[in-house]
Each structure stands twice: as structure tokens, then as C-alpha cells.
Image (cartoon, grey):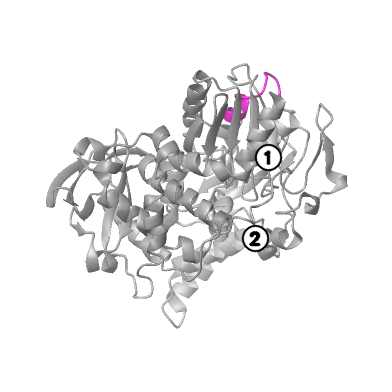
Amino acid sequence: MTKRKASIPIFIGLSIVIGIFIGSTFNYKNKSILFSSNTNEAKIKKLINYIQYDYVDKVNTDSLLDDAITNMLVKLDPHSVYIPKEELQHVTESMQGKFVGIGVSFLMHEDSVVVTGVIKGGPSEKAGILEGDRIIIAGNDTLFGKSIIAKANLDNKEIGTVLGNRKISDEVMKSLKGEPETTVNIAVYRRSVNEILQIPIARGEVSIKSVSSYYMINQTLGYINIDRFARTTYDEFKVGLDELISKGMTSLVLDLRGNPGGFMDIANSIIDEFLEEGKLIVFTKNKTGNVDKSFATSYGDFENGKVYVLIDQNSASASEIVAGALQDNDKGIIVGRRSFGKGLVQQEMDLGDGSAVRLTTSRYYTPTGRSIQKPYSKNDTQKYNNDYIERIHNGELIYKDSIKVDDHLKYTTPKGKVVYGGGGIVPDVFVPIDTVNTYSVRLYNRLNDFVFKYVDNHRVEMSKWKLNDFVEKFDNDNKIFNEYVNQLDLNSPIFEEESKNLKIYLNALFARNLFQETGYFMITQKRDPMILKVIELDKSTN
């Protein structure tokens, strides 16, 4: 019943922008030829100059050029993209796994910026910022009420919407970010003492986690969730893997659902933990036919353990490299639904003005030689982006037999398992999308606000909980659950299954608020069909 956070359109954007990276710059052998002036370049410069100086109306030529680059890349493939300078910093920070700031997570509640998390060891923790603090001023910027709405340039229709909150969040981040070791003076309102406190904070490097959680499901089965393959992901993964091994893990659930990809070398390093020395992980091929192969080393720490990889329709690129490498080497079991189907590799290229392009430079292939890139037309990107809708219509999210495979793209693993190329990784064990546990607006639309207010009003009491005790005992008497249900003013009763799902998700949101994603997943796994299937499989093989 795990409720995933990303919507379909947002995911498509991530899968295109993140994709698979093989580095940040090319080492061109003949830069003088590549970057020399030519007639095409002169033609574009002349056109821009004509428009800028001679066109009848004033025109933003920078915007025109951005649109021209975007339209040019669209005609190549779905994953060659232009990243404007306004967006590149955010994308780069996400993939590097760090940025310079004060180290807090926050949300907008009514007209205030409320701290919901303080990163351990970060600048804010050192300065004494607490969860629940309202940030009202940062430097010279007022961050509450009409001031923050005006700063974010919101119109009345955007106030309180997802888009409006995102714009406000962007403006808050601009006020909190800065150069390393610079000081930002923060004013916070602290409810517990009913005072406004002035707190100077020295900005520092803040980590952006890509391994959102890891824990033991039972005495021998561990769980690690990776939400993207950033530059820091392998180090985060290795910390989790080592800790779980020390706790007696012999089987691992590697959750790659909704993971849009990232750096290929990071994915390869993670795969290396599972494969024996000399096993082929992946290979790439460019337009000249050059092949680059990656092999496992002797340094894997979980080569003898069992692995279950969870994938779904939103698992893309580097996630598919992991699933494909393990599937083709007969290592572990792939569980879930057919993955996205992205087999193209991009290279980021700086355009000199703070913007960049990510250009497809090669294709990757799994160890058996499969390309899992789904078909695309250079003239019809809409059909490519609507693939998820097509999967809903053809029934493959519910029925395994509805997954279309091409017998001409049939491959065989060393142990004789039949696998297919041409459109994502088909799982070894299919788990349909959950159509029984639906989420009714009448039951769920007030959940986040209820959870926030409850925690905010009971912070001392809630802070006393320990994670494992919380998972087992929180609200066992249903007092908080009934408080939430009673304020819904429902016109019809809640069915038993609806009540169970609502109870799980309510507790999971409390757990996320107190214990981040680890708490959330430990609660939702109780009714997560893929996790339940893995537990069943693992019992049958022990």
C-alpha cells in the first residue's frame, strides 16, 4: 500500500533530466575542429542579431535561443535535453548529493516557514535550531505572511497550491543558501517558550540523501531504499549494507521503485557488491562502434547473499542497469512490474553561460547483450511520454500476460533463464499494481495537516518515542486515529479495509515526521504487496 510521492508528469521529467551520466565533460581529441567557426554557427548568430536589432517589437533573444536549443534536441531522442542556467544548479546539487546551506527541512504551514527536520551535525543543529521553529527572517528577507507571498510573486490563485508552495520554497532556499562559512542571521519564533530568537548560522555543506532508509525487516532480511544514483549514493549504500550485514542479514531487499537513474559508475559500484570477480556488469557502445565494458571486482561484500530487487514502471536507466546486471548474471530475483525502458546514456556538456545540455552519446547493454530502450520516434515524443497511460490501458500493470515482449529480442542467461530486450526489465516475479487499496479524497485529503498540527502541539510527548517501539505500539488504542476520523464529518461509514489502510498511512505519516523515511517505510511495509511477496519468497527458499 506504499503511497509514492512523485506524480507521473514529475517522474517523466526526472527520468529525462536525470537519466544516466558517464561524467561531466568530454575529452575531445580535436577541440579546434569541434569548436571552430562554421557557416551554421554564423547563420544562427546573424539571425539572433537581426531579431535583436531589427525586429519590430522587443524580444527576449535569450528565451528564443533556449527554445531553439530545446526544439533542436527534441528531434534527436527523448533524453537529450537542455538545462537552463536557472535550473542547472538545482539539478547539479541533487546529483552531487550536497549543497551549501543551513541544514534544515521545512514546510509552509498557513503563512509560516516551519522547520520539520534538522540535519544531524549540520549548521542549524550546531546553532540550536529546533524542529517546530518558525523561520520568520533570514538576513534581510522576511519569510512569513504577505512578504513571502510577494517575494515568491504569487497571484491569488496560486496561494495554498502545490505550485505556489514550490515557488515559496524556492525563495526560502535562496535566502538560506550561500557561500561556505558565510553567516546568515536567522530570526525564529519558538512556540515552546513563546519567544522570537535571534540565531546566527554559519552556512556549511549539507548532504542530500539518496539512500533514504535501511533497516532489518526481520532477523535475516534487510531493506535498502535508493531514490536516485547520485555522486554520494554508493558511500551511503555501503554504510547501510555494512550495518545490515553486521546485524545478521543474509537476504536483501533493494528497493528501486520510482528511481529515475543517475550516475552509471555509481550503479556499477553497487552492483559490484553482489557479483563475483570477472562478471560482466554492463557495456556501452557509441556511434563509432567503440565498446566499453565494466566488470565486477573481488571486493563485493554480499556476493553470497540473496538479493531481491524491487522495480516498477518508474524505475529507469541506472536502476535498470542494476536490475539487468543481476538478472542476466542469475543473481537474485527481480520483483515488481516492467521498468521504464531507458537504454540511452547522456553526457553533460557546458554551454559557457551557466546552462548545459545532456546529450545522448551511447547506448548501454546488459550482460546478455540486451538493449532495454523502449521504441521512440524522433517526430513523436508525446507517444513516448504517454507510455504509462498506454500500460494502464493494455492492462499490464495488473496482468503479467499483458506485458508485450518481442521474441526477436529474446536472450538467455547462463543458467537458462529467458529474458527480453526492447522495452524495460521484465521482472522474474510479477506483482500487480494495488487496485484494492484505493485512496479516497474524503479520507486522506486532511491527513498531512492533521499530522503536522498534532505533532506540533505534542512535540515533547512525541519526541520520547523510539523507532521500534513506535512501529509496534503507536496509537494501539486508536485514540489519535478516532480523533482524525471524527473531524472528517463523513456522510457514510468507513469500510473495514479502508479503515486498515487509513490507519497504516496515518501512522506512517507520523513516523515520517519523527523518524524520516525509515519510519515511513517500516510502517507501510506491513501492507506493501511487493514486500509481502519478498517475505513469502524468502521463506520458501530458506
The residue lying at 44 percent from left, 55 percent from top is: 87
Q: Which residues are magenta?
A: 269-279
Query: Of tags 2 and 1, which is closer to the observer?
Result: 1
Q: Secondary structure at mark 1?
A: strand
In which image quadrant can residue 284 be found? top right
Task: List the residue tagged with mark 1.
Answer: 335
Task: List the residue tagged with mark 2.
Answer: 385
In this rendered view, identify the residue nearer to me: 462 or 4.
462
The image position of residue 40, as x and y in percent, is: 60, 61
Apparent side of residue 323 relative to residue 89 in the rendered image (left or right)? right
The image position of residue 217, as x and y in percent, is: 54, 32
> Image quadrant for the C terminus?
top right
The residue lying at 51 percent from left, 65 percent from top is: 493
Q: Secondary structure at mark 2?
A: helix
Image position of 396 with respect to 539: above or below: below
Query: From this viewpoint, is residue 378 visible?
Result: no
Characterize the local packing of mark 2: few (<14), some (14-19) or many (20 or more) Cα atoms within 10 angstroms.
some
In this rendered view, identify the residue nearer to me: 95 or 412.
412
Query: From this viewpoint, is residue 535 visible?
Result: yes
Disc 1 marks a residue whose amino acid type is Val
Question: Within the magenta stretch, is there residue 486?
Answer: no
Question: Within the magenta stretch, is there residue 270?
Answer: yes
Characterize the local packing of mark 1: few (<14), some (14-19) or many (20 or more) Cα atoms within 10 angstroms.
many
